[in-house]
Amino acid sequence: MTGGSSNFNFLEAHDDRLFRLATLAERYFADDAPTALAKLRSFAETMAKEIAASHALLPPGSPSFDNVLSQLRRRAILPAQVADIFHLLRRKGNEAVHEEAGTTSDALAALKLARNLAIWFHTVYNNQPGFRAGPFVPPSPPKDVSDELREELAELRNQVTASRDAEAAARMAAADAEAARREALAQAGASEDGRAFWERYAAETEAKAQAAERELAEIQMSAQNAAPAQLDLLASAAAAAASEIELDEKSTRVLIDEQLHTAGWEVDNATLRHAAGTRPEYGRNMAIAEWPTKSGPADYALFVDGRCVGVIEAKRGARDVPGRLGQAQRYAQDITLDADALPEGGPWSDGDKRFRVPFMFATNGRPYVKQLATKSGIWFWNARTKEAPRALAEWFSPRDLVERLEQQVGEPMEAVAEREVGVSGLRPYQEQALDAVTAAIGVGQRSILLAMATGTGKTRLAIALMFELLRKKRFRRILFLVDRNALGRQTLDAMSTTDTSGFLKFDQVFPVTDLTTKFPEATTRVQVATVQAMIRRVFDETSEERPTPGTYDLIIVDEAHRGYTLDAELREDDLGFRSLDDYLSAYRRVLDYFDATTIALTATPALHTREIFGRPVFSYGYRQAVIDGYLIDHRPPRRITTALSQTGIMFDAGEEVSIIDPRTGQIDLIDLEDQVDFDVADFNKKVYTEAFNKAVAQAIALECPPSEPGKTLLFAARDDHADILVKALREALEEEYGPQPHDLVAKITGSVDRPLDAIKAFKNDPRPKYVVTVDLLTTGIDVPAITNLVFVRRVNSRILYDQMIGRATRRCDEIGKTYFRIFDAVDIYANLQDFTDMRPVVVDPALSFADLVRDLERAPTDEDRAIVRDQIVVKLRQRLKRLDTDRRDALEQAL
């Protein structure tokens, strides 16, 4: 009795439940549009769960449709255009179920899009490459139908006829016959049998849901056992098939409406039209279709509180989307507006052109794909800034455009000349870095990288930069992005203690929100958030708290080298990434999502950093910072040979690691991969033996007694290894020095109670004096009193290695710190020193000043003389503490 007329027949042999749900939607199209939309929502939800299971991503239990879509979006499984269709079917279905909302026109639009979705799904997940389904066969119109809908149905019928597709023509004839049969039965009063059939059909479809749950579990299990490469191929096939989706003009407009609605605009190209009498109103954010201009109607005009802020050129067939901005620019010049509808600050001039509206958009409805840049995306041009057109991930919200109108553009020359840095006490190199960044922004550079050694004050520089840019209104709202909560707290503390030129703290001048705030207030100027939290907010959030592309116009990325490891201690924000590439993909998509200038800060640039942010506009390395006296040099590392012998490594050359000649092996680290190829995983298995850890603990107890100033940080291989080391070190200290306070030695990892408080105690309190960590204290944490580092694990990430050494480079004048020491129980230093610039400046501390002066006199080249001179300078700085104040000041000035 289904008549064989379904547009979804191709699904029947592979997925009977999907076929039944779609067929029911077609059945109810004519006489019960809300039910048709509800069935299509079930159709989309069932399909989404099957897709998630096919990628081993179906959440446990009974996940909601929203949860499944969020999971697929976060992992970039659903191509953007496919995701848009899913979200439209979900929203329309929800409105139909909860509000009995939905017209026959809505049902027709949803049926057409659902069929596009079904073809894509069938091609990829039913493994039918090259599948062609033929044209969409329109259902027979209901009795009471608008002229516009009747015309659309007639046009669809004409397309079937013109296609010469025999199968489609047969389905259309069968649909007509079924409609005629139902009409005849209704007139004869004999429609009860037909109604009973469809009720049984619907009940049978629902009864299949339980069996479908079992099938999903089987699909998920199969995917979990599949090779990762196989799942990657499936995702690639999904992306390729999505590029083949062809929407007609009506469907394209429906999707654009949905995208604009999601961004916060009132929109309906069928009803909110200028020709239908729709006009802008105060208190409403409206996208009004077919707004008149002297050069033809604009597809949409965007109004906020009655004032026009933008125009949109939307054409399905556009092959050169940014090229269509020319048409949008003509609309912006020629638009017909009353004086009350003109935005403030206009018109805006560009040569001999005068734009009555500041923001112009062009789209063909397809999501932006970098490889097909000019054939996809939402392209945007700002008449206020006149920057080059660029693609957006999604539409701006009304608030985004209002805030861009408030953004200060340009700066009078006299203001530049009188500029006073708002944050006091910047060092010379920090001022140089600030100038380099502002110069890059001034020429329109939107991705900026700063490379500065750990401990040289990147956070303070960032605060000074934010103060300057916010004060000049060059940017409206800044996202300060960190990779863990501890760094976020540290940044917030710095903002609350940094003085500005007006004697107020930074956060007293500009409102700052903390890590728990999901969406900033209109008055917020700086928001601090973790990468993991932003991934959740962008890809999981569906409420009004989801950020829009214009929420931030500047992003400062702290520790931009992030990506060197999947940190096992970030459990609070664990998102279950399969691999480093999986994490980096989500990280980059967060950055790409926002239409914002990006300033990235790193101490350890690498190839993947450069690929995201470009080459540094300013660099200040560890060696130069030591020479200038801002960081502390380290002694050549000491091998703990008694521990190494337990792992089978023996040395004849003694305990001290030989430092390579600083003139050799010079590497441009920005072009170097992060991972270094040497034995790590197998070796780290050897560090769990009792004899090994006892040897390490005894050596540290002897070399770093509790009575000496400074603190000691040990890097363990895993959390349970940290427990072993803590126990061994406590025993060794008591054996050597007698009973000690229990909190003298502590473990600080993600598993301890209140780790942020433990970090604060390590930094500020006398105890603990010895701390064992895994990854939690490897990056960004500032504890100047650390004078000893102990490597009891290997890593093959040179970035992570540099970050670990960077924990001890900061000055601590309170304890007279002039150098720090490295103890190597795993022979990591010798393996990685070729790939780092974190080497000691004073290569041989035993050399006297007289020896160095003689070397300086004998040095054959300027380069050799510079290397010797640097060592003399650093040794002199280390002696400054022993001089009286006058001599110290004089020597400091000379250096």
Image (spheres, rainbow, N blue to C red):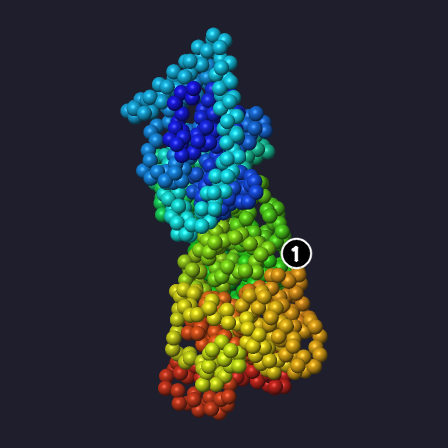
Name of the residue lying farthest toward the top = 188
Residue 301: x and y, percent? 47, 33
How packed is label 1: few (under 14 Cα within 10 Å), some, or many (20 or more)?
Answer: some
Residue shown at the point (37%, 83%) measured from the top left: 861
Q: Nearer the viewer, residue 6 or 420?
A: 6
Residue shown at the point (38%, 16%) measured from the top left: 177
Residue shown at the point (71%, 75%) measured from the top left: 741
For residue 824, above or below residue 92: below
The number of numbered discs placed on residues in the rendered structure image is: 1
Q: Nearer the viewer, residue 438 or 129?
A: 129
Q: Which amino acid lies under the numbered mark 1 shown in the image of this protein?
A: Gln
- Apparent side of residue 318 relative to residue 382 in the rendered image (left or right): left
Query: Dot 1 lies on which element?
Result: helix
Pointer 1 residue: 508
Residue 418 visible in this rendered orientation of the protein: no
Residue 693: x and y, percent? 57, 75
Residue 219 visible in this rendered orientation of the protein: yes
For residue 512, above or below residue 203: below
Q: Nearer the viewer, residue 791 or 668?
A: 791
Q: Quadrant of residue 82?
A: top left
